[in-house]
Image (cartoon, rainbow, N blue to C red):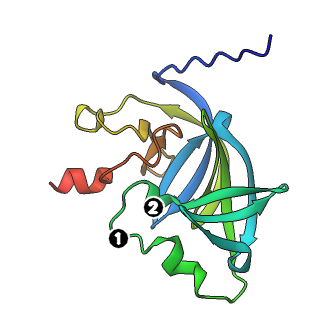
Amino acid sequence: MGTEVTLAMPMALGVASALIVEAGGKLYALPLESVQETFKTTDGRITRMMAGWGTDYRGSVLPLNGLGELLGDRNDTGLMNRWSDAGDGSELPVVVLKKARGRLGVVVDRLHRKMEITIKPLPVQFATYPHLSGVSIMGDGRVVFVLNPEGIGEAQRTPEESMAA
């Protein structure tokens, strides 16, 4: 009684529901099973915490990070630089992810839509990235990385940086 068992299995080729988001001009897919909620907050509601940034979320503090920062995008200016000093009341889209160790608020540039996607295995050169679980091809031919919420934040380089190396 009171025991919870979580079984994590890698995604294989298949169809899944995903939320398509944009960060740094790139599209990413987040599995809907890991998305608890989306909401918009303002830069005035984001506060500095010891380990980073946070906002009030349903009566508790939700840690916030920009998606580009979490993916290790060196071109991302960071949540702090983009919004903390602006003070203009801009609305920021936030995706609340359920992770094994709690919730995480991920600030994205734009929420696109929920859709069914076909997930294909990662090419061999991306197999060592814990934040990626597969790829999908959009109707217009763009390749979208499917993110693994459990691995987000453990990234060192973006896939684009790896391809350039």
Who comes first in sequence, dot 2 or dot 1? 2
Q: Say which mark, if any, is on residue 88.
A: none
Secondary structure under the numbered disc 1 in the rendered image: loop
Q: Quadrant of the N terminus?
A: top right
The residue lying furthest to the left in this view is: 165
Q: Quadrant of residue 85?
A: bottom right
In the displayed structure, would residue 140 be above or below residue 54?
above
In the depicted view, which residue is nearer to us: 133 or 55?
55
What is the crowding at mark 1: few (fewer than 14 residues within 10 Å), some, or many (at least 20)? few
Q: Position of residue 158 (x, y in %)?
A: 33, 54
Residue at image mark 1 = 75
Q: Foreground residue, 163 or 87?
A: 87
Task: Relative to 147, say whether 12 is above or below.
Answer: above
Residue at image point 50% right, 51% down: 28
- Image position of 26 (left or right of 57): left
Three-letter code, disc 1:
Asn
Q: Position of residue 3 (x, y in %)?
A: 72, 14
Q: Is residue 21 left or right of residue 164?
A: right
Q: Residue furthest front?
A: 50
Instruction: Tell me whether circle 2 and circle 1 mark residues in contact (CB < 8 Å).
Output: yes
- Determine the CA span between mark 2 and mark 1: 8 Å
Question: Which residue sits furthest right?
Answer: 59
Q: Which mark is drawn over residue 68?
A: 2
The amino acid pointed to by label 2 is Gly
Q: Residues within 10 Å of mark 2 (few under 14, many from 20)?
A: many
Q: Position of residue 131 (x, y in %)?
A: 42, 41
Q: Position of residue 53 (x, y in %)?
A: 59, 66
Residue at left offset 40%, top offset 45%: 154
Residue at (31, 50) in percent of width and height = 159
Q: Residue at x 72, y 80 (%)?
A: 44
